[in-house]
Every structure is written in C-alpha cells, then in structure tokens.
Image (tube, rainbow, N blue to C red):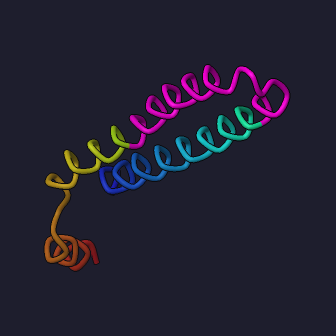
Amino acid sequence: MGLGLGVALAVSVAAIGSGVGQGIATGLACQGISRQPESAGRIQLVLIIGLAFMESLAIYGLLVFFMLQGQLPSFEQVMELSRLAQ
C-alpha cells in the first residue's frame, strides 16, 4: 500500500509543483517584459532556462514512477492478499 501511495505522490506532486512554478514564472516574466520591453530578450532567456529546470522536476517524478511501477504487486496479488486478510 505504501509503495502505491509513493508512486502516486511522486507523479502528482511533481506535476503540480512544476505546473504551478511554470505558471508563476511565466506570469512574472510577462510582467517584467511589459514594464521593460527593451529587456525582453534577456528575460526570455532566463525564463526558458528556469522553465527547463522546472520541467526536469516533472521528468524526475515520471522517472521515479517508472522505477517503482515494476515493484508494485499485480491486481491478482492484491486481490489474493485481500482475501487472505478477511
């Protein structure tokens, strides 16, 4: 049970965290460009680098999911364990 919860949390927290971070970063970059249009190129460069780091968080979460997925019990094993527990 704990492993299944860990797999689910790894993917969901990574996806939510990177999505929120990317949204905030993009919004602040748009504000910065609207205040100083002459520095749009520099802001865009920093934004793209930051977005790449944030996206790597989601990719690491997906990697953890694939690593732990092979260790999860099959549906038949879970059903047999639930029958034995009753």
**Eyeballing the image, is 38 above or below 69?**
above
- State the residue in front, 21 or 6: 21
Give the x, y percent position of residue 35: 85, 28
| Horizontal side of residue 18 vs 28, given as left or right | left
| Horizontal side of residue 42 vs 27, given as left or right | left
- State the residue in front, 85 or 75: 75
Q: Which quarter of the figure has residue 85?
A: bottom left
- State the residue in front, 44 or 85: 44
Quadrant of the snapshot with the N terminus: bottom left
**Residues in magenta?**
31-58
Q: Which residue is found at the position 30% from the left and 50% from the top?
A: 3
Q: Which residue is found at the position 77% from the left and 28% from the top?
A: 37
| Horizontal side of residue 76 vs 6, given as left or right | left
Q: Main secondary structure of the magenta part?
A: helix
56 drawn magenta: yes
Q: Which quarter of the figure has residue 81?
A: bottom left
Q: Residue furthest right?
A: 35
- State the residue in front, 6 or 2: 6
**Eyeballing the image, is 80 above or below 31?**
below
Q: Which residue is found at the position 55% from the left and 42% from the top?
A: 17
Give the x, y percent position of residue 59: 34, 42
